[in-house]
Image (cartoon, rainbow, N blue to C red):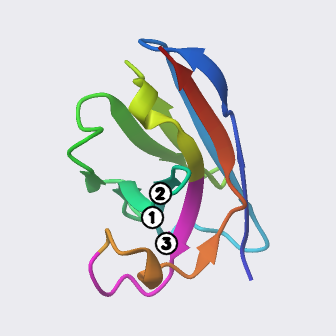
Amino acid sequence: QVQLVESGGGLVQAGGSLRLSCAASGRTISTYSMGWFRQAPGKEREFVARITGNGLSRLYADSVKGRFTISRDIAKNTVYLQMNSLKPEDTAVYHCAADLRQVGDPVLSYIYDYWGQGTQVTVSS
């Protein structure tokens, strides 16, 4: 079992930055691909970013490309999402997720095996 706990969310003005953290426990996530998803009120959960176990491959949603950066610290068993130039439309609950098997389309939420509870990000205009 893997437990994932997100932190770092909050209220920020448009144009500001936040760094989200996803701390894993119970098992090392060094070989897992890790993803970030978000869900705004009344909307479906959507893919944000993904990083492979070795950190060499990263994938971003078009809506965040150039503004968000996903990274990982193997020693800390933690994944990060640096969010810059935030927009009101980035407002959502952000969840991290672990993909153990790494088979399937990485933007699809159902391929991920473990999920955190989420952290709220609110961007004011």
Q: Are marks 2 and 3 in contact (CB under 8 Å)?
A: no
Label disc, if present, on residue 31 of the rendered structure? 3
How crowded is the residue under tag 1: few (<14 C-alpha within 10 Å), some, or many (20+)? Answer: few
Magenta segment, which residues? 95-105
Q: Say whether disc 2 or disc 1 marks the residue closer to the N-terminus.
A: 2
Residue type, label 1: Glu
Tell me what residue is drawn at x 66 percent, y 34 percent: 9
Residue type, label 3: Thr
How crowded is the residue under tag 2: few (<14 C-alpha within 10 Å), some, or many (20+)? Answer: many
Q: CA distance from mark 2 to mark 1?
A: 10 Å
Residue position for label 2:
37
Q: Are marks 2 and 1 in contact (CB under 8 Å)?
A: no
How crowded is the residue under tag 3: few (<14 C-alpha within 10 Å), some, or many (20+)? Answer: some
Q: Are marks 1 and 3 in contact (CB under 8 Å)?
A: no
Q: Quadrant of residue 110?
A: bottom left
Label disc, if present, on residue 81 of the rendered structure? none
Q: Quadrant of residue 56?
A: bottom left
Residue position for label 1:
44
